[in-house]
Image (cartoon, grey):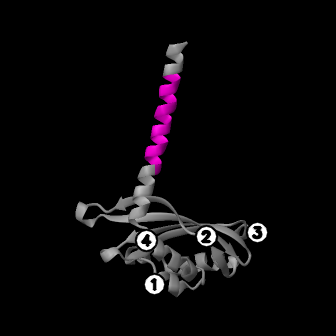
Amino acid sequence: MKKILAILGFVVFAIFTVFASDWGYTYYKSSQYKETALPYVEMVIPEISKWDTEIIKQHMPPESLQNTSDEKIKGIVLHLSRLGDLEKFEKPEFSKIYSVGKAEEDQRNIVSYTVEADYENGDATIDISVLEGQEKSFHVHNFMINSSALSE
């Protein structure tokens, strides 16, 4: 019986350690971008929510613009504009960070956030990833908006 309790205690301790380590690592990674990516995301959400194709394109990196036609961007923006005006949004929550690029000198970080927002025609969850550029500048790598208002 003591052996089973000792094993069970070890398993609980191991699970706790894994979760605590994951939380600590996520906090560490998110704090690296608290002064750079987070303010950018807070600034760009209202800009994107104007539903203006030209404004959105200004926030996209050149690589994304090369791979996406103007017609496709216009179609997406037209669909998303059904949400109406942005009323408010919550503080962005750090989601993850990953690197892109083939050679080490070409690698750049993409930082992802989740944002809860209220629009004129319904609530939405925005998943936004920003690409880190030179001198801690950022561009919108991609974003996805989920809302029941878009499925009607």
- Asked if the stretch drawn in magenta spans residue 27, the answer is no
Image marks 4 and 2: residues in contact by CB distance under 8 Å: no
- Report which residue position mark 4 lands on: 37
Residue reaching furthest to the front: 2
Say whether disc 3 or disc 4 marks the residue closer to the N-terminus: 4
- In x, y percent, where is residue 28? 40, 57
Please name the amino acid that badge 1 sits on: Gln
Q: Nearer the viewer, residue 95 or 73?
A: 95
Q: Are marks 1 and 4 in contact (CB under 8 Å)?
A: no
Residue 58 is labelled as 1
What segment is highlighted magenta in the picture? 7-23
Residue lying at 49% horizontally and 20% vertically, measured from the top left: 6
Is 52 placed left or right of 38 in the picture? right
The answer to which image quadrant residue 115 occupies is bottom right
- Mark 2 is surrounded, within 10 Å at the Cα level, by few (under 14), some (14 to 19) or many (20 or more) other residues, namely few
Q: Disc number at residue 90?
A: 2
125 w.r.t. 23: above or below: below
Q: Which label lies toward us, 1 or 4?
A: 4
The quarter in which the C terminus is drawn is: bottom right
- N-term-proximal mark, 2 vs 3: 2
Disc 2 versus disc 3: nearer the observer:
2
From this view, report whether residue 106 is shown above or below residue 49. Answer: above
Which residue is identified by label 3?
A: 152
Task: Answer whether labels 3 and 4 touch (C-beta < 8 Å).
Answer: no
Is 116 on the left-hand or right-hand side of 36? right
The amino acid type, in three-letter code, at marker 3 is: Glu
Q: CA distance from mark 3 to mark 1?
A: 30 Å
Where residue 95 sits in the image (x, y, percent)? Answer: 50, 59
